[in-house]
Image (spheres, rainbow, N blue to C red):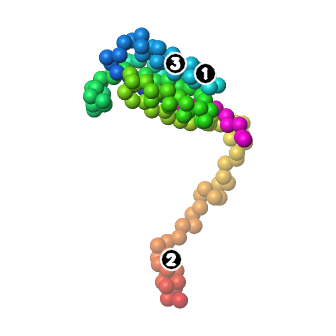
């Protein structure tokens, strides 16, 4: 079987505001331990270390406010189901979502313009710049008529 490499994920949880802060911190620590025990690694850049109280746009399980918590981590895709199983069991979690975060591709660094090359470009000859052989509109009309009459 192929060894899958870890992918980046973002977990967002909404906790019940009536839950005890200690209980919520215990759930957060348990989530982190599940990730670590399944060979996952927390990301250096996590959005919120502590849950933040936010007003919801609509009622969720008869709640109009929730404690909002984001967490980024890397884990094998096979281990996500274990994490979801634990999240479903927690009664203080109103809602959660796990999103696959795509890795940012680094754009190649553009090389600065080498002005030495530009200095070596010679100007166009004067003949090309001073063309006085402009065609007259009457000549163009004649040529157009010849083409159409053929």
Of labels 2 and 3, the one closer to you:
3
Q: Earlier in the sequence, mark 2 or mark 3?
A: 3
The front one of 52 and 75 is 75
The structure residue drawn at horizontal position 59% and vertical position 58%, both measured from the top left corner, is: 130
Tell me the CA gap for discs 2 and 1.
83 Å
Residue 55 appears left or right of 80: left
Look at the magenta stretch and give its main secondary structure: loop
Q: Is residue 101 magenta?
A: no
* Residue 63 on image: x %, y %: 28, 26
Q: Residues within 10 Å of mark 2 (few under 14, many from 20)?
A: few
Examine the rendered structure and indicate whether residue 109 appears above or below residue 149.
above
Examine the rendered structure and indicate whether residue 89 appears above or below residue 24.
below
Tell me the CA gap for discs 2 and 3.
87 Å
Q: Is residue 4 magenta?
A: yes
Say which residue label 3 marks. Answer: 30
Say which residue label 1 marks. Answer: 36
| The image quarter in which residue 1 lies | top right
The structure residue drawn at horizontal position 70% and vertical position 45%, both measured from the top left corner, is: 121
Pick out the residue farthest to the bottom.
150
Q: Earlier in the sequence, mark 3 or mark 1?
A: 3
Query: Can residue 10 be seen in this snapshot?
Result: no
| Circle 1 SS class | helix
Label drawn at residue 139: 2
Of labels 2 and 1, the one closer to you:
1
Q: Residues within 10 Å of mark 3 (few under 14, many from 20)?
A: some
């Amino acid at each position: 079987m192929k060894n899958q490499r870890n992918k980046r994920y973002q977990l967002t949880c909404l906790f019940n505001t009536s839950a005890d802060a200690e209980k919520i911190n215990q759930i957060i620590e348990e989530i982190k331990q599940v990730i670590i025990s399944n060979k996952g690694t927390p990301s250096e850049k996590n959005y919120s270390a502590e849950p933040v109280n936010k007003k919801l746009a609509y009622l969720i399980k008869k709640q109009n406010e929730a404690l909002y918590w984001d967490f980024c981590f890397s884990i094998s895709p096979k281990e996500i189901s274990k994490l979801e199983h634990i999240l479903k069991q927690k009664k203080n979690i109103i809602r959660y979502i796990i999103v696959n975060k795509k890795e940012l591709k680094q754009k190649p660094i553009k090389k600065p313009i080498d002005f030495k090359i530009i200095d070596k470009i010679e100007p166009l000859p004067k003949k090309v710049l001073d063309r006085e052989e402009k065609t007259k509109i009457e000549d163009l009309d004649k040529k157009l008529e010849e083409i159409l009459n053929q």
